[in-house]
């Protein structure tokens, strides 16, 4: 049957774009369905402020009347490295379909004078990134990509080469805060003149939100795929994840002048709740999410930031000491790390003193546009 690639126009086609993975991964117990309304808002230029500095095109692949794949091509305005992006890549196990989708994204980027394309990635390094290449039997989470094992084969077959790898870890939370961690944290606090800010309510965290994103820009500027978070984007991300925020899952560290120097943000795992919601808050999706916030044994680590001035001075110990108190209080047994660059040994050393396992690996791919 004839294959057709169609660029999306209109809300009806965008809804099909968002809902295609629900068919592709139907019955897969490791894929986490997004909330459809959140996904539609993320891809709406009228809602997501990233479109003030980027543009995108979205494509669907059809065989007859049946959708068999999707892809997004993204271009940051004023990008000096001439490297475009592709993401939201989902496809059946068919090399022809994959190549036609990728070709559509590549041509769109070539017409804008881009020389390379990398993917799968998002608009920024706070978005989902990396094709899963190991850990297909592990439950995903709401901030990462899940895909079938054949994706890597399709990308390589389309002329792409491995580019960047990320690792993920599952860390065992101790039943009690280790005495050695307590002692070391006190030593670091005294030596550097730092203090932990008690976060008893969500408002205690939110009042540091602007400072968190300022520090995030400062600490992540040299990381792969970095895109600075503008004030409007910061407000957008705050609204997007505010409903999942819990004070016990956060850590705020300040200096003697009460200036933020480090932070850690995690949330109760929403994976099982999102699976039960199956893309919708109604009729019972909201209830499953509320239950996951109240009763959970797993937390997802979202972000950690340490001011460069204080890096490699033991400050992460303060964050984890503070984290451990809140997580133990809430009955958390497992902490899922966010994807960490494979060559970021400093971050990986954080887990060295805890029982942990590296259980997932993901990879982006790159291709020269000729």
Image (spheres, helix red, strand yellow):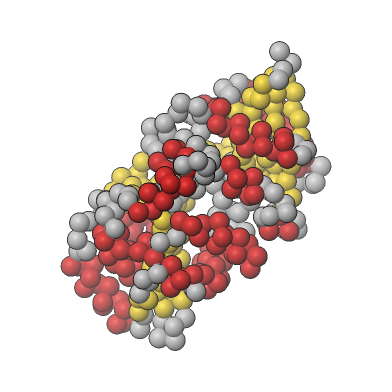
- Work out whether residue 156 can be spotted: no
Horizontal side of 79 relative to 33 (left or right) equals right
Q: Residue furthest top?
A: 1
- Residue visible at 74% across and 27% down in the picture: 5
Residue 208 in the figure: left or right of residue 86? left
Looking at the rendering, in which quadrant would you find the N terminus? Answer: top right
Quadrant of the rendered image containing residue 262: bottom left
- Most distant residue in the right direction: 111
Which residue is at the front of the view, 153 or 132? 132
Residue 167, image x, y percentages: 42, 46
Residue located at (72% from left, 52% from top): 45
Q: Where is residue 308 in the image (x, y as percent from the top left)?
A: 47, 72
Q: Is residue 42 left or right of residue 330?
A: right
Quarter assignment of residue 229: bottom right
Q: Relative to 47, is 15 above or below?
A: above
Q: Does residue 210 show up?
A: yes
Exactly how many numbered labels are in the figure?
Answer: 0
| Residue 295 picture location, percent across and down | 32, 51
Q: Which residue lies furthest to the front in this view?
A: 283
Camera-side residue of 345 and 108: 108
Which residue is drawn at the image coordinates 42% and 45% (left, top)?
288
Instruction: Identify the residue at horizontal 31%, vertical 68% (top origin).
Output: 322
Task: Choose top left, top right, bottom left or bottom right for residue 263.
Answer: bottom left
Say whether residue 321 is left or right of residue 82.
left
In the image, 251 versus 220, the foreground residue is 251
Q: Quadrant of the C terminus?
A: top right
Please tell me whether residue 2 is drawn above or below residue 317 in the rendered image.
above
């Amino acid at each position: 049957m004839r294959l057709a690639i169609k660029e999306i126009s209109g809300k009806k086609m965008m809804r099909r774009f968002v809902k295609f993975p629900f068919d592709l991964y139907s019955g897969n117990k490791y894929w986490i369905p997004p909330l459809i309304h959140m996904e539609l808002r993320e891809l709406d230029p009228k809602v997501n402020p990233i479109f003030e500095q980027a543009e995108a095109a979205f494509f669907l692949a059809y065989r007859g009347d049946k959708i068999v794949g999707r892809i997004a091509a993204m271009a940051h305005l004023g990008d000096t490295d001439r490297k475009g992006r592709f993401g939201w890549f989902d496809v059946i196990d068919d090399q022809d379909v994959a190549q036609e989708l990728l070709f559509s994204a590549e041509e769109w980027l070539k017409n804008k004078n881009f020389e390379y394309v990398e993917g799968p990635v998002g608009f920024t390094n706070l978005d989902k990134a990396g094709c899963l290449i190991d850990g297909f039997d592990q439950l995903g989470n709401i901030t990462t990509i899940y895909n079938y094992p054949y994706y890597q084969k399709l990308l390589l077959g389309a002329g792409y080469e491995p580019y960047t790898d990320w690792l993920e870890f599952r860390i065992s939370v101790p039943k009690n805060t280790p005495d050695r961690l307590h002692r070391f944290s006190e030593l670091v606090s005294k030596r550097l003149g730092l203090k932990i800010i008690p976060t008893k309510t969500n408002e205690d965290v939110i009042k540091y939100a602007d400072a968190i994103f300022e520090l995030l820009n400062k600490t992540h500027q040299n990381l792969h795929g970095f895109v600075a978070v503008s004030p409007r984007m910061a407000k957008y991300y705050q609204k997007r994840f505010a409903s999942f925020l819990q004070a016990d899952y956060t850590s705020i560290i300040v200096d003697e002048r009460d200036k933020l120097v480090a932070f850690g943000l995690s949330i109760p795992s929403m994976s099982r709740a999102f699976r039960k919601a199956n893309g919708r808050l109604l009729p019972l999706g909201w209830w499953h999410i509320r239950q996951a916030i109240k009763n959970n044994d797993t937390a997802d680590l979202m972000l950690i930031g340490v001011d460069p001035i204080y890096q490699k001075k033991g400050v992460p110990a303060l964050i984890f000491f503070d984290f451990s108190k809140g997580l133990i209080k809430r009955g958390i047994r497992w902490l899922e790390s966010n994807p960490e660059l494979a060559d970021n040994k400093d971050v990986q050393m954080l887990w060295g003193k805890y029982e942990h396992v590296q259980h997932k690996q993901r990879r982006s791919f790159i291709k020269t546009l000729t």
